[in-house]
Image (cartoon, grey):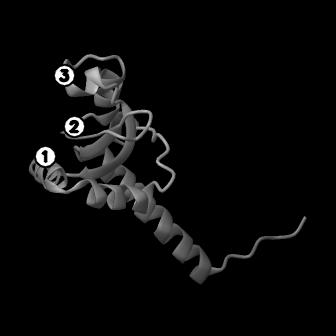
Amino acid sequence: MTRQTFNFKKDRIFYFYVLIFITNLIIMKTTKLYFTYMLSNYSNKLLYVGSSSNLSQRVHRHKIGYFEGHTKKYNINRLIYFETYTSIDEAIKREQQIKSYNRSKKNKLINKVNPQWRELEAPLNNF
């Protein structure tokens, strides 16, 4: 059995990154998150833009047809894009900004992060 030697410089850097990781987890758990999101129908011809403080619940409600109106009528329930914010005001402002975009600008936004337009998994419990 060989004896492990302690490399102060390497181990200090490792523990520094562990500390940063744990700090970020604590911040994420204590910070309320808000989302701006886009949904599409199966053929990707229709888009819906919204914002929510609980994205997984909101997407689920769209899927079961909980909301009467446009999304239920046209089966718009596939999450294809979302952004995360720490302020509801920021999320609502961004929602309004995206709603003002024309279709090609919305497509470019989606294509940057989801070029195949695959259905995304909503973060659970704000993570």
Q: Residues within 10 Å of mark 1 (few under 14, many from 20)?
A: some
Spot occupied by residue 2 in the image (x, y as percentages of width and height): 87, 69
Pick the front one: 84 or 110: 110
Residue with the mark numbered 1: 88
* Circles 1 and 3 in contact, beta carbons < 8 Å: no
Callout 2 touching callout 1 (CB < 8 Å): yes
Name the amino acid type tagged 1. Answer: Ile
What's the amino acid at mark 3?
Gly
How far apart marks 2 and 1 lie (CA) works out to 8 Å
Is residue 19 found left or right of 54 in the rendered image?
A: right
Quarter placement of the C terminus: top left
Q: Position of residue 42 (x, y in %)?
A: 44, 33
Q: Which residue is mark 2?
A: 53
Of callouts 1 and 3, which one flags the residue occurring earlier in the amino acid sequence? 3
Residue drawn at x 36%, y 38% is 40
Considering the numbered disc 1 on the image, is that residue within a helix, a strand or a loop? helix
Tell us which disc is closer to us: 1 or 3.
3
Q: Is residue 61 left or right of residue 5?
A: left
